[in-house]
Amino acid sequence: MQLLQGLRNHIGLVPNPVSQATRQARSRIRGAEVSISVCPYCAVGCSQLVYTKDGRILDIEGNYESPINGGTLCPKGAATWQLIHSPLRELRVKYRAPYSDHWEERSLDWAMERIAQLVKQTRDATFVHRDENGLVVNRTLGIAHLGGATLDNEENYLIKKLFTGGLGIVAVENQARI
Amino acid sequence: MPGLGARLGRGGATTTLASLAESDCIVIMGSNMAENHPVGFRFVVKARERGARIIHVDPRFSRTSALADLHVPIRPGSDLVFLGALVNYVLNSERWNSDPFFREYVLHYTNASVLVSPDFRDTEDLAGVFSGYDPQQHRYDPSSWQYAGRVQPLDGERWPCRPRIEPERDPTLQHPNCALQVVKRHFARYTPELVEQACGVPRDLFVEVADTILANSGRDRTTAFCYAVAWTQHTIGTQIISCCALLQLLLGNIGRPGGGILALRGHATIQGSTDIPTLFDLLPGYLKMPQAIPQHATLADYFAHERPATGLWYDMPKFLISLLKAWYGDAATPENDFAYEFLPKIGGDYSFQSILTMMKDGIIKGLFVMGMNPAVGGQNARLARQALANLDWLVVRDVHEIETASFWYDAPEVRSGEVRPQDIKTEVFFLPAAIAAEKDGTFTNTHRLVQWHDKAVDPPGDARSEAHFVFQLGQRLKELYAGDESPAGRQIAALTWDYPTVGPHQELDLMAVAREISGYRVSDGRPVAGFQELADDGSTACGCWIYSGIVTPEGEHRAKRRRGDDRASLDWGFAWPANRRILYNRASADPQGRPWSERKKWIWWDPEQQRWVGYDVPDFPASKPPDYQPPPGARGLEAHPGTAPFIMMLDGQGWLFVPRGLLDGPLPTHYEPWETPVTNPLYPAQPRSPVAPVFLRPDNPYHEIGDPRYPYVITTYRLTEHHTAGGMSRWVPWLAELQPAGFVELSPELARELGITTGDWVVVETARGCAEARALVTERVQPLVIAGRTVHVIGMPWHFGFGGLATGGIANELAALVKDPNSLIHEAKSFTCTIRKGRLQEGVVR
Amino acid sequence: MNSESTLVGRTRARPGAFGFLTDTTLCIGCKACEVACKQWNQLPMDDFGFTGMSYDNTGDLGATTWRHVAFIERVADRQGRRPTRLQPFQSHWLMLSDVCKHCVNAGCMEACPTGAIIRTEFDTVVIQQDVCNGCGYCVPACPFGVPALSPLDGKAHKCTLCYDRLKDGLEPACSKACPTDAIQFGPVHALMDRAKARVAELQAQGVDARIYGDEALGGTGGIGGLNAFFILTAPPEVYNLPAAPELPQRRVLPAFLTTALAALVLGVATLLSFWRTKEVRHG
Amino acid sequence: MAELRRWQHRRAPGEPVSAETRESYYGLPVIHGPHWRWPIVFYFVLGGLAGGSAVLAAAARLVGGRWARSVVRIGRYLAFLAVLPGPLLLIVDLGRPERFHHMLRVVKLRSPMSVGVWGLVGFTASAFLNALWQAAEDGLLGRRGVVRCIRRLPDRGLAAMSLLPAFFLAGYTGVLLGATAVPLWARNALRLGPLFLCSALSSAAAALSLLVGSGPDVQRVRRALERVEQVALVGELALLEAVQRGSGDVVGRPITVGLEGRAYAGARASAGLALGLHLLARVVPRRCRTVLRVLAALVAFGGAFLLRAAMVFGGRCSAEDPRATFVMTRGERH
């Protein structure tokens, strides 16, 4: 009987022989963990579902629940998975010494320490307590910051707090200005 | 942002994307919404399916135009003429003058009836400048723009504030000096004929637009405006936007469902980074950054100068002192002005463009760049790269090796051999950054909606979040400065910087930062329920008062709420302020508190409960009755009557005439772009903005008006397939392949003149530099007839650069450093250029 | 032969068939479908470059591109005049997201000699990658130019209508992503009813809308309709779609018959020539 | 886009991109063409030769007398030898050669390729048996018992049995091409089978007449083969003409211009020439005849090759041409 059925599936005008792999096909996100994220691109604020299995992101798609995007995404939002897994994404610290013509690999810790030293040097060299009119200004013009519109609000807060409130760096700007 | 702020009280979008679906007419101007906000555009399509009219006013026929009912091709830089003409048309229209709705709305909700100081002189009287102009300083003294009225100083205050003004009013709106009449006179010359002459828009087409908007505004219908940076990026950008606010106030479209003005922003949290500003002139919550002027010397001075007697800003001390407590903790005491002295005082303009010149001039020696690409996104890109090359050190944090990190070996001038890496001293650090899905945190979207994103995985390799970087840097610096008693040392020492960390990378706990932003009682650390709980005595701390209450007293982060519905979705995320979705929504009810119409009801006064109820959180004192009249000498919000929807404003009203807050005049006035092929038809003597900040320096040359060497108008824009300066798209294969190369769009008419074929290499050139791109000859771009002569327009996406997979000439090589005096935003949407067939030398562009 | 009217909106799709309705009048050409498809199916970037074909730098459906958005500019008239008053919804810049049609009778499937191409329980047409041996016969057998051989693995590929997602009750990636619901997924018969209503509504607004993929247009010549069908506002050839394609296998039987006939004639001739040929006398 | 195959794409200065979508969509093909190239051409030629030879061998065995045995022998050997490379050529052409056996997974009557595979298998089997019997007969296999068993097989039966697969192999390739969306092939679906049959028979006859070499009845054999060849050539010529005319200007373009066009013309010319030479051979002095006949055979054989090449590569061009597809798929609405 089964043999007959099998034959019928393989012989005929247009037989339809379904393979084992096809029968077993399932979506790769079945059983994956879901976390809810927000698209990192424009300011519409589309909600994204991030599917992960053992620490790896399998898939990122729109969140039906969102009153903003209702499951949809634009091409950029739909490419978020590849933004994260881009073959061209940089994952290591790169350092270029003054006047050098090449990058060097450095450890994150080394870079952090070096940057902290440079900040202190420059700040100490350029810090102004009172300006020419004798007004207390407690600022430095020697250091500047650019960026923020693609970061988190909390990160913007920390940047403003540390750089401006803690270090007197006033030249802090982001893309809202362009 | 000041464009909306000056007239309505807040710079944020007044409405939400979803509310667009309820519009009867949507005007998209200064924006290519379908291309740059495709998902937002679905609400426009929804509205269209419900029968709304879609109008797209844009120089190019874009993917937005394709879905519109009307496409109005307009000369870049002439938007204000178009909007001004709409104002004029409305004010003189039969409908506006006969339908009681408009009079009722304008009389109660705007300052139409206030009398302007008799000293005020209009641009119409002074050939293109307002009274108070100082031609030497290129600045205005706004004293002559003030209301006519009694000024009464206030006393008996814990913290001083500005004297209160009792303006004279004329409820008949007939007095020649009442705001409405001033506005009417000001725009009298903005006629359909002028539109045809200056914008290149046929008269009848303009009239059709005006009639459509007018017919779809009123008691039972609302019209919404959507704009983006194509309004902002002009020397008069702020005034263009404020002109739209003026128009929407006249039409009674503010604060109502399906109405309002939607600012479409380009970055995930560009709204948030303005609310919690990484901007030089602001503190969190739109508090002014203190300046190095005697008026800001002490905290009291600051308040005496900045704090109004009426409106919500009267509470300014609560907000600022809570911020100081959040930043300086125990070091901030009543005795030491809450450590006010540690707040650096700004002594000039340190906005983006100035930073570039300060770098090049050696004033700025070290630079942090986080998630931004100034080498491509900076105007006069060559100057921007020279600025980078003149730094001592540069820290770039991004996911890809963007041009800002690779300029020293990959920039055009380096490839062409003009500059050698060995000549560039900059010490460059590239630190890999984490992406949203790899970190906890919040974004604030284009309609002020704060949404939390969960961390799904740890960032790979050395990649870390900015929070991690800044926190670690702060800790190291605190150690380095330990025991340093110098002012510099005391400043950093005073800063509170202890946050718990979690995870393998010691990422700091973002909830702790969120709690600080939201605010808490200093005594026991209990989160405050909202800014109403903030105090001016140091008993509360709050990092950003407009986000106050985002963490509930129970400790729940409201941006994590994810229960949407098909109306206001109040339980999806948190919209500042206080989760209000449509701003100024008191105006959605008539002065007596009843909905203007069943179809457009949003919030209304419930006499039984004696409070405002409805679909949204009232943007108004919830229990203040419509008939409330302020007692004499009342302050703050008490001073506003029950019919004042604009709680941030001094008088609670939308401003048709702006006595303070704008640097380039109380009324929108058309000035030509800094570089233009035609002269100003209104003010030949004053063609360009009299107060636009310019950079007169050899490395930033400008084109004269009508310079024959640069005959064409160029406008820059973005594409669906890419994101801003490309750092997040040109390196991503799936996006790069969709728009793989930089190109220039030009009309067949111009292409025929220049013998250019689609696919040819062309070089676009200005006095600043040149950019190479491929030609796309398309009828979507068209020449316009301006004052009898043909003006050709060229379009160029500005995404491209020399890095990544999708490469192309940098459009910003062409742009100049020149900006709007209020927002300090540059002018990239309209300047002049020339274009020729051919290439720059090989290798300049891959 | 059926008359035009009875064919309009008619499909022979089996009950329970699923498919796409791609409504170009709602399409904003954002290409989210292209990327969402590549993301879910993990398809590599194509060999790319600037084409100058309006905003279409994809060009074609292929082994690694299963959704393709076509861009056709119709902005100016012959005199070069640009319009200002436009018809409702998409007009003057036509954009269509092309995809495998999942034909009711599929040329690729009938051609496939290995049975790699099957009809699934959702009545969609899928190439089983564990079976395909890259003979390439399905490629020219498709009247719409959908399947293509991949130089990467030598096998034929095309849209699977996200078979793996359907198995788990998930919506296909492209229709889910589509911001304006220009791509809708669902039971073919329900979609067809929706399409007819939509077309009627559009025609009432003066739009020259039509369904592509019924037996009157696109699903013709024995194909019996397309499970993935479209609403167009211009003749299909404008979008590079054949107006009245034919199921190639329709010709198999007739062709074999003529061949047999020829065989008969030649066979007789051959037999005769060997039967009748006489001895050749020398001298 | 490097990958894009434009059909005669021209751009002019100042021409808007919209102009490129008036005739077609930027000149891009509507359908995807086949990837088939030389291996398939050779398979078609050899398949035809094998089929043709088998037909001739069978006919000679069934109705020809002893005198025709040379045709039977050589025909059987040639059929078997000519078909042997077939499967190899097909496998080489696969994207995944190691999966060639998947071809035997189904029997799909609507798919000429599926049916063709089984036909090829059947033919190879029968060709093998025929050749085996012949070899036994010719004593090439010695005198062992097995051989005796083989010789007991019904010789005429084997011959009769081989006719069907032989004709099938010679003709099905035409049907296979016809059952695609390629305009040139689709338009000529009904003609290609017969055309390939004719050229199969003519080329086989030509080949055999060259190979029969010398023998008592060689003249008679040659004449018989010539008759077949001439009939086939006449049919071939007629069909070549019909295909050309039937295709029309647009669809027929590939077999009119360019390399493929020349190949097609060549095929037609050689058919005509071969026919002419045979006729000529009747009137010229006997000593020249052999030369002419040899010449004719060579020409006919070459023609068969050119025909297959022209059709395969012509089909590729045809698929590239959107206008050809549109012409083929114009409904009432257009």
Image (cartoon, rainbow, N blue to C red):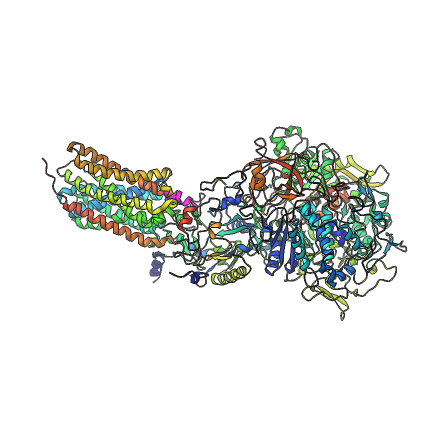
Q: How many marks?
A: 0
- Is residue A111 visible in the rendered image? The answer is yes
Where's residue B485, x and y in %? 82, 40
Q: Closer to the camera, C44 or B225?
A: B225
Q: Is residue B813 left or right of residue C205?
A: right
From the top left corner, tell me how far across and down residue B210 is, in percent: 68, 55
B754, B11: nearer the viewer: B754
What residue span does the magenta drawing correspond to?
D313-322
User: Furthest residue to the bottom?
Assistant: B608
Could you say where residue B38 lies in the image, as x and y percent from the top left?
60, 52
Residue at far left of view: C283
Residue D144 placement: quadrant: top left
Q: Quadrant of the C terminus of chain B?
A: top right
Q: B137 or C40, which lies in front?
A: B137
> How far across and how far down the image is residue B405, in percent?
64, 37
Please tell me whether the stretch drawn in magenta is mainly helix, strand or loop.
Answer: helix
Q: Is residue D101 among what the camera can see? A: no
Asked if residue C252 is among those painted magenta in the image, a careful observer would answer no
Q: Nearer the viewer, residue B639 or B284?
A: B639
User: Any magenta on residue D321?
Assistant: yes
